[in-house]
Amino acid sequence: MILVLSIILTVLVVYLYLDVWFYVQARPPIIQKEPTIPAVVPPEQTDIPLYPDLKFKSIVRTKGVYSYEKMIGHLQALVDQYDLLTVDIIGESVERRAIYLVKLGHGPKKILLDGAHHGSEWISSFLLMTMVEHYAYHYHTGQSFFEYDLRDLLSTYTLYVVPMVNPDGVEIVATNGHSSLNYDRLLTFNNGSRNFALWKANARGVDLNRQYPTNWHLARDYGPAVPASANHAGSEPLTEPEVIILERLQQQEQFAAHLAYHSVGNMVFYYYYQTGRWLERDRGLAQAVANLTGYELRHSSGGIGGMERDHVVTTYQIPSLIMELGINKQRPLPEFTGMWERNRKVPCLVMTWLEQWEP
Ligand SMILES: [Zn+2]
């Protein structure tokens, strides 16, 4: 009986072994493919900013689109907290939202920083508001901001910050079009699409960065002839209230330099047909900013006329840099921490550089 059982067991073991062996042999060879790295999709709801060097609980935060409503709440809280800041309303958008100007400093020389000419580029508003808060905090506490002394810099300069030039455009993105007073009209401007994530224009379908007088006719000929989500230059230059407000500010204040914040490209633009010493100065400053941020310095104009930079360079003859902050058009928030680290010192560098430049 034991012998019979042993034989059966042995046969079974041999059978199983052979079966496994044949299975292994019969398997197709493993194809050595490129390892597939799963795409990292950061959560949309990241509570940003998460600064490693943060020594205070920040007011300026967002978990999604940095909307006009959020910005107003933060402006109020910042004004309450910091004496350094003043906030003025310098005009109204097409849909009667306020356009805010934040002033930081007491210096006679002035630098203009503006963000969100384009609605979908609201991350530039968030960056500028974050900058306002950090500068105000370091000024207030007297702490150095990296190698910079903000109390010293802001006694020579005043930073003029217009964090959201196009609040209607930002709200169109934030509410997917439902902020608009006329949703159906907006839908036609958007080519029938109900996705407004990439909307750049103002509430009338005019691209505010194609509205400035310098070579405006090129923007008109290049862009769509009718209102659209982007690139429509309008019927004439300076028809839109948002642009008129910025132009008036430039005329009144005679800035020493201008930084225009946009969000797509990881680049710095500065060139618009300057020559001689004028070119040397503007290129020198842009190069210093590119070195600091790691952004690619673009020596071409990169535009087709009607842009704010084109107009500021030719009309006011001051350095005017376009800062293209990141890459992702639809979901820029996961890029924000790196964006902030690259950009936080830029205005300090600009102020210091201008003081040292010998004409
Ligand atoms: Zn832009």
Image (cartoon, grey):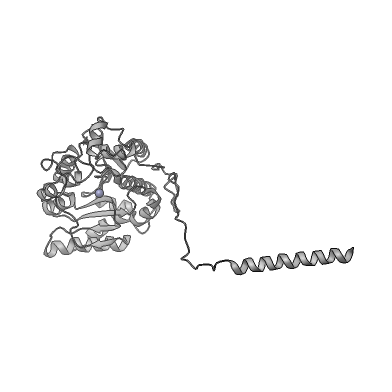
Q: Residue at x 50, y 67 (%)?
A: 31
Relative to 177, residue 12 above or below: below
Whether residue 359 is visible to the viewer of this picture, yes or no, is no
Q: Residue at x 38, y 52 (%)?
A: 335
Quadrant location of residue 87? top left
Residue 176, how many percent across, how many down? 32, 37
Residue 264, how many percent across, how many down? 29, 53
Residue 120, how many percent across, how many down? 29, 44
Residue 107, how many percent across, how many down? 24, 49
Relative to 91, residue 218 above or below: below
Q: Residue at x 58, y 66 (%)?
A: 27
| Count of numbered circles on the image | 0
State the residue lying farthest toward the top: 181
In front of the other: 12 or 130: 12
Quadrant location of residue 17? bottom right
In front of the other: 285 or 233: 233
Q: Please identify the quadrant where the N terminus is shown.
A: bottom right
